[in-house]
Amino acid sequence: MRTVKQIVHAKAHRILSIQPENTVYDALLQMAEHDVGALIVLQGEQLVGIFSERDYARKIILNGKTSKLTLVSEVMTRHVICVNPDRSADECMALMTEKHVRHLPVIENKTIIAVISIGDVVREMISDQQHTIAQLEQYIMS
């Protein structure tokens, strides 16, 4: 099973972020433009939260707030679960399942180097299973 570092290296990644004083509407525009489900919230270069589609659905719509008048800081998730690049895809899947999160910032030397999604982890696990199946088929045929 590959590590987070290998997953990040293999994918074209960019760290999309927003500042806590931006509006939720600004965050939604950026998420739609880049076709992502979450943004890292940075104050300067410091990680202060994450804003996701789930935050929008549960903290804006269900509470009768408006995205154009609400700041990201009011509804972002402040306790951000992060991983280091040495974690395996299996460990990330277990963590994401246990904590009910879909995005994990990857931290190395106190710096965010990437964000991996549940999709990245699932793709890695499928690839690993396909490789194992191919090896078993080859073994059986020989």
Image (tube, grey):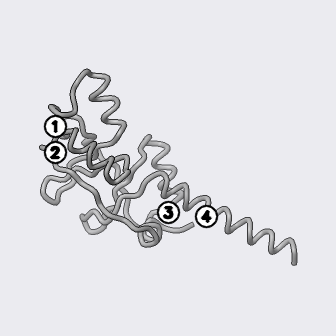
Please name the residue shown 25% across and 42% down the image: 78
The amino acid at mark 3 is Ser
Crowd rating for badge 4 (residues with CA inside 10 Å; few <14, some 14–19, many 20+): few
Q: Earlier in the sequence, mark 4 or mark 3?
A: 3
| Left-right relation of 105 to 98 | left
| Left-right relation of 34 to 21 | right
SS category of the residue bearing label 3: loop
| Closest to the observer, 59 or 25 | 25
Q: Earlier in the sequence, mark 2 or mark 4?
A: 2
Q: Foreground mark, 4 or 3?
A: 4
Please name the residue shown 31% across and 66% down the image: 113
Q: Foreground mark, 3 or 2?
A: 2
Quadrant that contains the C terminus: bottom right
Task: Identify residue for label 4.
Answer: 127
Please name the residue shown 37% across and 46% down the image: 37
The amino acid at mark 2 is Pro
SS category of the residue bearing label 1: loop
Crowd rating for badge 1 (residues with CA inside 10 Å; few <14, some 14–19, many 20+): some
Q: Earlier in the sequence, mark 2 or mark 1?
A: 2
Task: Identify residue for label 3.
Answer: 88
Task: Identify residue for label 2.
Answer: 20
Crowd rating for badge 3 (residues with CA inside 10 Å; few <14, some 14–19, many 20+): many
Please name the residue shown 16% across and 37% down the image: 71
